[in-house]
Each structure stands twice: as structure tokens, then as C-alpha cells.
Image (tube, helix red, strand yellow):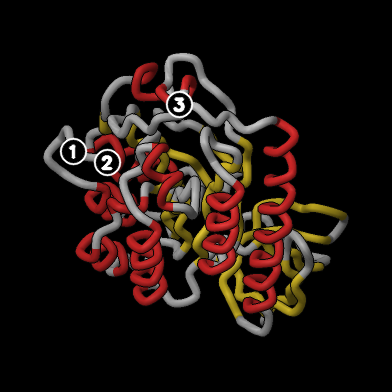
Amino acid sequence: LSISAMHGRTRAFVKIEDGCDRFCSYCIIPYARGRVRSKPLEDIREEAARLGEAGYKEVVLTGINLPAYGKDLGGDLCDAVEAACAAPGILRVRLGSLEPEQLTPPVIARLAAQEKLCPQFHLSLQSGCDDTLRRMNRHYTTAEYRQIVGDLRKAFPNCAVTTDIMVGFAGETEEEFAKSLAFAKEIAFAKVHVFAYSRRPGTRAYDMPGQVPNREKERRSREMIAATLETQRAFFVAQTGRVEEVLFEQERDRNVYEGYTRNYTPVRVASAAPLQGQILQVRLTQALEDFCLGELVL
């Protein structure tokens, strides 16, 4: 059984694809891991079914370039999602990191038809400036990214859109950084992983001019983190008052259990009875910095 990781006995990560042929200018993966290789659908069905039989309620489909799944098999990512959703006992299917331009309107429509698919989408952005994106050899513009996010939010009401943002990429000027910062605020991500560019020997970006000093990278990281924490907080605030299904994963403190909504909002609930492994209705009552508080709806 080829399963990359498990969380308690609630959520399992199933790797369905390896390799990448995108050749972003900062990334060594296509050279180190080779081209896209997809796991056969029958293997995905079997793994998901075994996990459901073992008591897992959620599977997360992962890959190096997840939306490229199936291009070597004559299929696509939707096939894999449908296979996992059909597994007995599996109540939730979640997607790992996604390349945005591959989420076309037909793909989004097909995904939206799967009731078990969780409305949380990690769309890798890297930069909110078109000039920077071109140097990175990313395959979309900010306008296209904005449209894709809008399409997702229309198809999946109250979905969470999360991302990665790199600061200090080779040649990133203060003006480019300002554009990236403004775009991140505009999209209002539910959560952002901010990191500073690090040169990788063997990549095209390694020898690009305009390498940004470390001190400047650190400053930009702080600014981006501060801004995106505000959008995260706003997202949590928007969740309060809602009643959502929460899959409880662990006891954080004595009689305090933590789990996740379908859109991956972390929620903590006080309960004398154990909640781990259960999916329960919870009213979200308060937004804190890293999670929401809630109460069981009896």
C-alpha cells in the first residue's frame, strides 16, 4: 500500500503523481525527479478503499505537479478525484498543491460535481507581479490567476484559497514587490506560506542578475507575512457564526479537541467526551490568530 503519510486515523495522504515538466527557473525538481508519472487509477481506487476500510475518513491526493496527473495515462486529475470519492468509507477528498492555470472552467465544473471534494484549494502563486512571474517561467499572469480564483469561489461557495508566495526572487525590485504585496491583499487568501528565494545551483535563476540581499529578503518576508496574516484573520472572522462539519483529529489540551472544517479552517472545541475521529456539526463562535473556537451543535 503506497501511502505517503497518515494523520492519526482520520486523514491519509496518497501520492498519485511524481515528476514535473514545468521547468520554473528557480526549481531543480524537473531535473532531479524527471517527467510526470501518474499512479494508475485502479491503484488509487484500491488505496482509498483500504484506507476507508481501516477507518480513515479523509484522503488528501498529492503530487509534485498534481494537476498534471494522468497526462501520461490518457486521463486527468478529475479521474483520480472521482476514483477516490467513490471509495467506501471515505467521506472527504482533499487536493494538495495545485498549479493554477490547469484549473480550467471544465475542470472546475467537474470537480464541483463531487460532493466529497473539500472546498480548499492551494493555488501556487509565487509572485503577484507579472514581470516576476515571467522571469520565474510561471505559466500564468496575475489576471489569469484572478479569474481562476473567481471561478473557484463561484463554483465552491465559502471555499478557502491558500497559496505560497516567494519574496526576493532574482531581479525583484521594490516596485515588483509592492505589486506582489498588493495582489496578495486583493485576493485575500485564507492562508499564505511566505518564503524567501534561495539560489539553487543548476537552475536558470542561479545566474540571473539582480540577486536580492538577504537583509532585504528578510524585510520583504516580514511585510508579506504581516499582510497575509491580516487576510487569514479576516477569513477566520468570516467563518464565525457558521455551522460546519468538523473532522476532529486530536486532543490539543485536556478536554479540548482540534479538527478541520471542509474548507480546512482549524477549529477547537471543549468537550468532556472524546471527539477524535468523528465528523460533527460545530458552530464557529470566535476567530483567533491561528484557529477558530467552536461549540458542538447537539
* Callout 1 touching callout 2 (CB < 8 Å): yes
Between label 2 and label 3, give the one nearer the viewer: 3
> Residue 295 lies in what quarter of the image?
bottom right
Picture quadrant of residue 294 = bottom right
Task: Say which residue label 3 marks.
Answer: 205
Q: Compared to 200, does 178 lie above or below?
A: below
Question: Which quadrant of the structure image shows residue 94?
Answer: bottom left
Percent position (x, y) of residue 9?
58, 45
- Single out the residue that lies furthest toward the right: 254
- The mark total stands at 3
In the structure shown, which secondary structural element does the residue marked by tag 3 occupy?
Answer: helix
Q: Which residue is mark 2?
A: 68
Circle nearer the N terminus (2, 3): 2
Q: Going by the image, does 244 lie left or right of 217?
A: left
SS of the residue under disc 1: loop
| Residue beneath disc 1 | 71
Q: Is residue 289 visible?
A: yes
Q: Is residue 62 left or right of residue 102?
A: right
Q: Residue at x 57, y 52 (%)?
A: 175
The amino acid pointed to by label 1 is: Lys
Of marks 3 and 1, which one's residue comes earlier in the chain?
1
